[in-house]
Amino acid sequence: MTQIDLSTKLDPNAQRFARAFVSHVLSRCDPEVLVSRSLDFTSFDSPTHVLAFGKASVKMAQACVQGLGSRFSGGIVLAPDSLFPDPAPNTALQYFGVDHPAPSHRNVAATDALVQYARKIPAEHNYCIVCISGGGSAHLCSPRQGVTIEQLFETTNTLNAGGASIQELNEARKSLETLKGGGLAEILAHVGYCQAVVLSDVLDDDLNTIASGPMISLAHPVEHTIIGNHQTALDAADDFFGGLGVGICKAGISGGSSDRGRELAGAYQESGQAACLFAGETTVDASGTTGVGGPCIELTLACALELAESGQADWITLGLATDGIDGPTDAAGAVITSEMLADPYNQLSAHKALVDHNTLPFLDSIHATIRSGPTGTNLNDLCLVSPCDALRADRGLG
């Protein structure tokens, strides 16, 4: 179970609320649960191999191993080392550590191992399940001839810092690498049957964008099954508020984080102060700044500041990056109450933090930051604003 770390100086009721909400959402976004619900493993009646990459790869692969039982024939998982089970429950499933968000030489070596394994899968009477999740573009890394890892690293960092969308980033990656845009599907074309299982972290579930579409090939079509997306996370959040009622649920948000945060504050005020929920993927253009922050916590702070400056009282706002890592930070999100921004000095400091895209130090200073480390799932970001009535222990939330 994911450990949720909050400042001991945070209001105890806010701590209780944040822990309950985050735990509730993550439990319903668990990739093992989503894979088990979505796949009919009885249809895999031949030896089946599993290849997995992305932030949810470990749990997705483990669910496949469990579901396949004796039909599981081996496989490879690429993931950050912190997500590896210790000890590994199945020696036939090999784990290779990779770096994120920028690719590295480790990622190239791990990808080479996966490709070699894929090529050796027997052509007849063998199946393959390919588990794909967000982060897979960095993990599955195979530069084209003449392209260096340093060039990939620079491209990734420059586009991320400039607030590029995931679509823009992954289009650039496709031009520099071999497995993206159907390259892996071509390598697996000899296998009797392949199925891609996808945990979507992009808007509209664009299969060409998720992990840069490694199994999207016109020449070698592969069945894709999407097991969850940002709507899954939004539904979990909505369910958490079942007893209170929700005014507005909005999925698929995009654009600048601060703009969407102010929009969320406006939606809350227009709803008559019922809980409002946004889910999706926003961006921060931090080029020309040296601030430390991520899109989810910037959205959360922008929402809170808009409410505070309008004189609105008695609210709580909470943002959660479901993968546990908000952009380049170690934050999973933030929880802010109206009391935390009641002081005009804090409002001025919050405004400066947003302008400088330096939100993490400010949120740490007011004890608002949520930390969890990698969660093993990846369904974009959630942000909510609710009356402080949600903090009351007698509501029985979560």
Image (cartoon, rainbow, N blue to C red):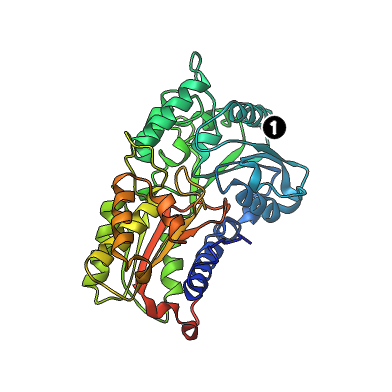
* Residue furthest to the bottom: 394
Q: In this rendering, would 52 be left or right of 215? A: right
Q: Nearer the viewer, residue 245 or 363?
A: 363
Local SS, label 1: loop
Q: Residue furthest top?
A: 146
In the rendered image, residue 259, in percent from the top left (x then y), is placed at: 25, 53
Classify mark 1: residues with Cα within 10 Å, few (<14), some (14-19) or many (20+). few
The residue at 34%/45% (across/down) is 357
Q: Quadrant of the N terminus?
A: bottom right
Between 318 and 192, the one nearer to me in the picture: 318
Q: Is residue 346 left or right of residue 58?
A: left
Q: Is residue 254 visible?
A: no
Residue situated furthest front in the rendering: 345
**Residue shown at the point (46%, 67%) measured from the top left:** 236
Residue type highlighted by circle 1: Pro
Foreground residue among 147 and 31 = 147
Which residue, given by chain and number where applicable, does mark 1 sit on?
A: 122
Residue 128, horizontal then vertical, whole percent: 62, 41
